[in-house]
Image: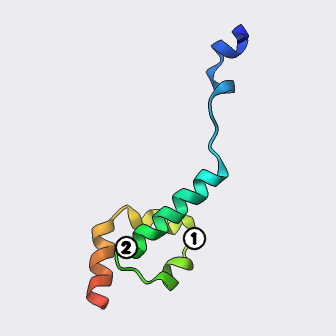
Amino acid sequence: MATSTFRNKNIVRPHKKSAAKRKRVRDQRKRLIGLGMPAEQVEKLCYREVRDLLKFPVKVQKAYQTAE
């Protein structure tokens, strides 16, 4: 390995992949469904809204537990 790339970690660091992001978003949507949120409603959310809801899973669970 060349010395310049050895010293510059930013050039050789691994980058985030879009496939991994899709997997994370898919798993997070499954978590919301597991908390009791309807699947049709979860499908309409963008990924940012999904992440915001998962910050407080107890609130989500209580909100949809009383709705049933």
Quarter of the image where the C terminus is located: bottom left
Task: Left or right? Give the position of 31 relative to 63.
Answer: right
Asked if 43 appears above or below 11 in the picture, the reply is below
Whether pointer 2 and pointer 1 mark residues with C-beta atoms closer than 8 Å, the reply is no
Pair 2/1: label in front: 2
Residue 19: % across, % down:
64, 53
Q: Which residue is mark 2?
A: 34
Seen in the picture, residue 7 relative to 10 is either above or below; the reply is above
- Residue sitting at x 30%, y 75%: 61
Q: Which mark is residue 25?
A: none
Q: CA distance from mark 2 to mark 1?
A: 18 Å
The residue pinned by badge 1 equals: 46
Q: Is residue 29 left or right of residue 3?
A: left
Mark 2 is surrounded, within 10 Å at the Cα level, by few (under 14), some (14 to 19) or many (20 or more) other residues, namely few
Which residue: 64% across, 38% down? 15
Q: The residue under label 2 is which amino acid type?
A: Gly
Which quadrant would residue 38 be assigned to in this image?
bottom left
Secondary structure, mark 1, is: loop
The quarter in which the N terminus is drawn is: top right
In front: 34, or 67?
34
**Badge 1 amino acid:** Cys
- Asked if residue 27 lies left or right of residue 14, the reply is left
Q: Residues within 10 Å of mark 1 (few under 14, many from 20)?
A: few
